[in-house]
Image (cartoon, helix red, strand yellow):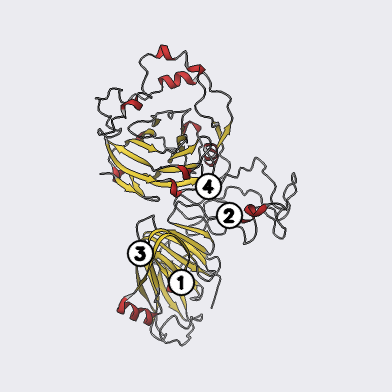
Amino acid sequence: MAREFQRGHKAKISDLTAGTDLYVGVSIAGPGLTFDISCFGLDANEQLSDDRYFVFYNQPKSPEESIQQLGAQAGDSESFRVTLDRIPAGIHRLSFTASVDGDGQMSQIGPGYIRIVAGGEEVVRYSFTGSEFSTERALMIGDFYLKDVWRFAAVGQGFDGGLAALLKNFGGEVAEEEAAPEQQVPAQATGAPGFAPPPQAAAPAPSFGAPAQAPAQAPAPAAAFAAPPQPAAHQPAAPQQQPVHSAPTMVGPLTTPPAAPYGQPPHPPQQPGPPSYGQVPGRQPGYGGQVPPPAPAPAPYGQQPAYGQQPPYGQQPSYGQQPPYGQAPGQVPGQQPAAGAGLAAALQPYKEAPTGARWTPQNQQLMRVDLSMGGQAVLARQGSMVLYQGKVDFSYKGAGFAGRIVGNATGQEMQLMRCTGRGQVFLAETGAHLHAIELQGDGICVSAENVLAFDESLQHEVRRIEGHGIPGGALFTMQFQGSGTVIVKTHGVPVVLPVTPTTFADSNAIVAWSSASQVIISSQVRLRRNAYPGHSGETVNLQFRGAPGNFIVVQPYEV
């Protein structure tokens, strides 16, 4: 039976099927709409560094034929053959996309899906509808990506532009084409893959293709990509046909700029754009003006990427990439926006961040969680909800009698609410900076007062930090372990530091640390009065020890 994926779900291909010769079917349709369905073969930087791996209507296969476009068949609007063990080492991601050819938007589409078939059996399906999108004209549906092994991710991410904008987003370049060249005609006539099913209705589907119980109308579309019975009769008329697609054709890749976030246009430094607010056209930006930054090196472990750097796949965007409150992108501080910009331009910097992940920061102080992704509840601090959309249920999450006793005795009690349903919940608290920390089987220690929310799948308990010479004999913190995300609050932008044998931290400034670190109490710096039983105000701080790879998180704040 096929596994039903929701948006954001990921799985190893080996967990879905043992095969590597896969059939990928895409179904998308809307009244009066025509779609271009394509596959982008991207490198480790998620760029189209080799334009031969852009598989679309004008280029139906890659050089070694590891990716082939088959056409409509077996009830699918478009289909592909993907042979994973033949994909070159330089290709790390296959992104399957759909874009509107002409007028229209993704909110007009009906129910659609992407599915994977192996050995004649459907193994996974991700379904979507137009109600999940608005004015977007393109859709990133699903990805095959290489992370030690090949995996599949249900993306479901809308994109504001069409096929040309998608191509630029992946580092390509487009140019208008007046007419289809004649050399494409034999390619269309002879480019049928050798494994295509025969046009006879009684013939079974291939081992990698659609299931044998495909709808009856499947054989008719199949003949569209098989070799025609009389090629001599059809070839003379082919040059007189008008081009089917009006979208531009790819010319060459652009590898200089870094990848732009989904839903935003790229920022190539070679081509000048419109002047920023307050900048004179044709003049180079002066002191304080924003210029495209060079591609930075990857950020150290636990540290947020620098401004303009694209975070790795699956990681939340870095905090600090948004302009200061009230300042438009590209605006020089202290200058007013150009007159006549209009209300839409004034509000554009504060537009909701695109969907596509379970946890998404809207700015430094506001976090959105999509409950429809992941299929699990969220535990959040009571009173932290500032907005929700969709059908969401909130209920009290009690700790039980024993939990209340432990919480009161250790100072680690959390008043939580349980959020369930299908919708989006926006969380914030007193303007604190929020950070999403994803755990994948590892652990982290965070004081309860620094926790805003976390996935219910995470295990959490009070951890004791031994100490001598202080009233009560110990300090306490919360330890989170398992697979899920915890949202941590800080006063200001924190810093992540590696643990060394001589690492000491003021307990008023420490936010979190890796659970594998060894913590020792040292009586040199004051300790917050309510952090341990007794409330005496004894002066101590924390010393950290641990193997390489352990870290601490410190905020620029003291009580």
Say above or below: 84 vs 409: above
Dot 4: few (<14), some (14–19), or many (≥20) neighbours within 10 Å?
many
Which residue is the site of mark 1? 383
Residue 52: image location, x then y, percent: 48, 31
Which residue is the site of mark 3? 456
In the depicted view, which residue is nearer to us: 43 or 545?
43
The answer to whether the residues at label 1 and label 3 have Cβ atoms under 8 Å apart is no
Query: Alpha carbon of mark 1 to alpha carbon of mark 3: how far?
Result: 18 Å
Residue 482: image location, x then y, percent: 34, 62
- Circle nearer the N terminus (4, 1): 4
Identify residue type, mark 4: Gly
Point out which mark residue 263 bears: 4
Identify residue type, mark 2: Tyr
Query: Alpha carbon of mark 1 to alpha carbon of mark 2: how far?
Result: 32 Å
Q: Left of 212 or right of it: where is 73?
A: right
Query: Alpha carbon of mark 4 to alpha carbon of mark 1: how far?
Result: 32 Å
Q: Quadrant of residue 223?
A: top left
Point out which mark residue 190 bears: none
Where disc 4 sits, the SS reads loop
Identify residue type, mark 1: Gly
Dot 3: few (<14), some (14–19), or many (≥20) neighbours within 10 Å?
some
Which residue is the site of mark 2? 307
- Circle nearer the N terminus (4, 2): 4
| Residue drawn at (37%, 19%) of the image | 227
Question: Would residue 149 be seen by someone viewing this image from the given angle?
Answer: no
| Residue drawn at (42%, 19%) of the image | 189
Look at discs 1 and 3 and give the one toward the viewer: 1
